[in-house]
Image: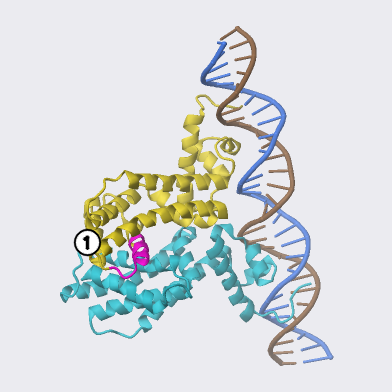
Chain colours: A yellow, B cyan, C blue, D brown
Amino acid sequence: MARTAGSHSDITGPRVREAALTLFARHGYAAVSMRQIARDVGVQAGALYNYTPDKQTLLFDLLQGHMDDLLSALADAPVQPTPPDQLEAFTRFHIRFHLERPQAVFISYMELRNLTPENFAVIEDLRRRYERALEAILQAGRDAGAFHVVDTKITTLAIIAMLTGVNTWYRSGGRLSLPEVEAIYWDMVRKAVT
Amino acid sequence: MARTAGSHSDITGPRVREAALTLFARHGYAAVSMRQIARDVGVQAGALYNYTPDKQTLLFDLLQGHMDDLLSALADAPVQPTPPDQLEAFTRFHIRFHLERPQAVFISYMELRNLTPENFAVIEDLRRRYERALEAILQAGRDAGAFHVVDTKITTLAIIAMLTGVNTWYRSGGRLSLPEVEAIYWDMVRKAVT
DNA sequence: AGATTATCTGAACGCTTGTTCAGATCAAGC
DNA sequence: GCTTGATCTGAACAAGCGTTCAGATAATCT
């Protein structure tokens, strides 16, 4: 046997990335074999190499795609007039965006060490760009006298760490709705920098 | 050849755990082989099985040991009179304890999914116990009117996530000293709950 | 000094790994 | 309807995996 009925690159390609994303998130990059991914897609392992040159690149493409999505979604968000409004918008954006794609967020934090140094540098650069967006808000707010932050770099990382933590416990349909969660976190962020 | 000069359980045992901790932290549990650990220790792979029944137990023992250390260190910390003092003490304790053992902290967050369900449940229980210590402080402070927190459970997780984030960027000998870092984080925590 | 025991080696076990590739098959273009 | 090219199979490769164990050696005990 060989090519199966209805097989096509437009279909199989995304399914490979989906399966890889799910499996990497569940078991970790190193613990997932190409054959497992292939089985999930419904294909033999060799066929995967029509869609990725190797396993490493498959991981890298997932992480890079996630970071690209993050940065372009941030760029598309409506511009707010004042630093406090910008910070509130950023807070809500971050929570919402991250809760919408928990698997991609998960592997983006867990699998960095499985990237080659060159690939790692690329992802790290994208992450820094995102952090700088938040830091710029904090600096503007401090300059305007609206925020009281000792160190904008550390505050940036502290806020992002705090917000990303939502992904470890939030389950849709749980005790709190998404707007309630956003409100609680925004309340903490606002007070922390005021 | 067989037993090497000066070989002894009291020496090799800790060295196995040390090597496993370092390698697991650097490359991840699944990516590290028993032969790599053995090479680091300076021994053949088979000899490791004098010190652990299998690789899974080796990981579990590292995580359980870390959580035991955490909980007993917390229990040994001096008792503070008021909730704000308790919260400050907790904040400083958490930062200091975690910065002292970055590798153990790292694998305790990253390798949970590589535990068997039974082992996972044990570690999860220990983690919950630590979280409950912080939540008790927040509840006491709210009851006393010192803290204004909407949801003590979420605030607990938010604070821990924020504080643990220090491990991702802090390097000793860097721009900020440990006391400065503690002060900055305590400032944010204090304001966030007030 | 001789016997005992803890410790380690080295080889072996069956199995899985990422990746390659010739050949088979299906979809599309003319 | 035939050809061409994209897509997939199935087998193969060398390498590495966790784990076991008989035998060798060094430390310890009497």
**Which region of the structure is painted magenta?**
A149-161
Marked residue chain, label 1: A
In this view, the residue in front, B49 or B42, is: B42
Residue name at image x 56 percent, y 68 percent: B22
The residue where tag 1 is placed is: A187
The residue lying furthest to the front in this view is: A143
Q: Residue at 58% across / 67% down in the picture? A: B53
The residue nearer to you, when weighing A128 against A56, is A128
Whether residue A158 is in magenta: the answer is: yes
Identify the image quadrant of the C terminus of chain B.
Answer: bottom left
Q: Where's the N terminus of chain B, which quadrant?
A: bottom right
A36 in relation to B180, above or below: above
Q: Is residue B141 visible?
A: yes
Residue D3, position in %: x, y? Answer: 64, 14
Q: Is residue A137 within the magenta segment?
A: no
Q: Is residue A116 visible?
A: no
Seen from this angle, which residue lies furthest left? B145
